[in-house]
Image (spheres, coloured by chain):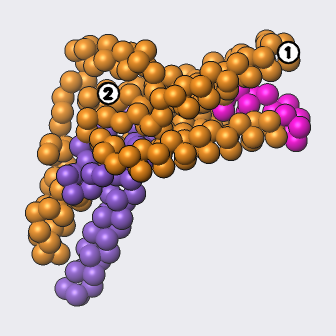
Amino acid sequence: MSYLLFSTRIASYLVRKTNLNEEKEEVLAYAIEVLSLNLLNVTLSLLIGYLLGVLPGTLVCLLTVAAIRIFAGGAHSNSPWRCAAITALVFPIMGLIAKKTTIFIQPLAADTFMAVSFLISFAVIYTLAPVDSPSAPIKSKTRRKRLKFFSLSSFAIITFSVALINYSIQSGKELQFYITFGVLWSSFILTPVGHKLFQTIDRLKILNRKE
Amino acid sequence: MKKLTYWMFSFAVAGLVFLASVASASACWLGHYQPQVPKSLQK
């Protein structure tokens, strides 16, 4: 297994200090890598969101995508640093587009856009989720079924929340748009087109370092 | 002091093992990069 240098170093230090076996070292390196990369991604994303003046929007997009992606999976980049760059940029940009869109869009057009987005996303999640990757294959059929069930449940809760915002929060259009963009991104990265996009980004000769 | 340090490291290890099992049970996490899931956690 190949993990980043700092993950393996911390893991081997912890294993030495607690007299654990080598198998546990791999598990620890994996946990350290998941934790540190996700923290880095979220921090960078929120920082850029703050600098662009769309911190709440970035946060809502992040939370929406997290709620679906944890169960539905999706396309991945093959470099942690390219992934950090994508994550750091995608969520603030989504927040920014959502914020700007709410300024000029007519209420009827906004509702139609959201309804169509949610319908398309439902169809995509229902048909494709969960989407695994070679690094984290879903081997068991039961697990696959469970992940699909939770993906759809998570999507249903989000849809219900967006409908509720319509009735409970005055001028909640902005919030609804942040959530809608998050849902659209989550379903887009499940599709073959989403995978193609990541493959194209991976072919770029930037941020190629593995360490 | 040595015992306390040992307990602290053991606590950190327990937390990380828990995190690894939660992470491997989900399809993926927020980032767009997926580290290789250890064989012992694949299901």
Badge 2 and badge 1 in a common chain:
yes
Q: Is residue A180 above or below residue A18?
A: above
Q: Which label's residue is closer to the chain start, 2 or 1?
A: 2
Say left or right for A20 vs A183.
Answer: left
Q: Which residues are magenta?
A: A166-179
Give residue A83's position: percent from left, percent from top.
Answer: 35, 30
Q: Quadrant of the N terminus of chain A?
A: top left
Q: Residue at x 29, y 31 (%)?
A: A81
Whether residues under marks 2 and 1 lie with C-beta atoms below 8 angstroms apart, the answer is: no
- Which shade of the palette goes to chain B? purple
Give residue A129's position: percent from left, percent from top.
Answer: 48, 34
Residue position marked by numbered label 1 in the rendering: A108
Q: Is residue A187 above or below residue A25?
A: above
| CA neighbours of label 1 inside 10 A, class few (<14), some (14 to 19), many (20+) | few
Answer yes or no: is residue A185 visible. Answer: no
**Residue A96 position by quadrant:** top right
Residue position marked by numbered label 2 in the rendering: A77
- Amino acid type at image mark 2: Ser
Query: Looking at the image, which is closer to me, B28 or A88?
Result: B28
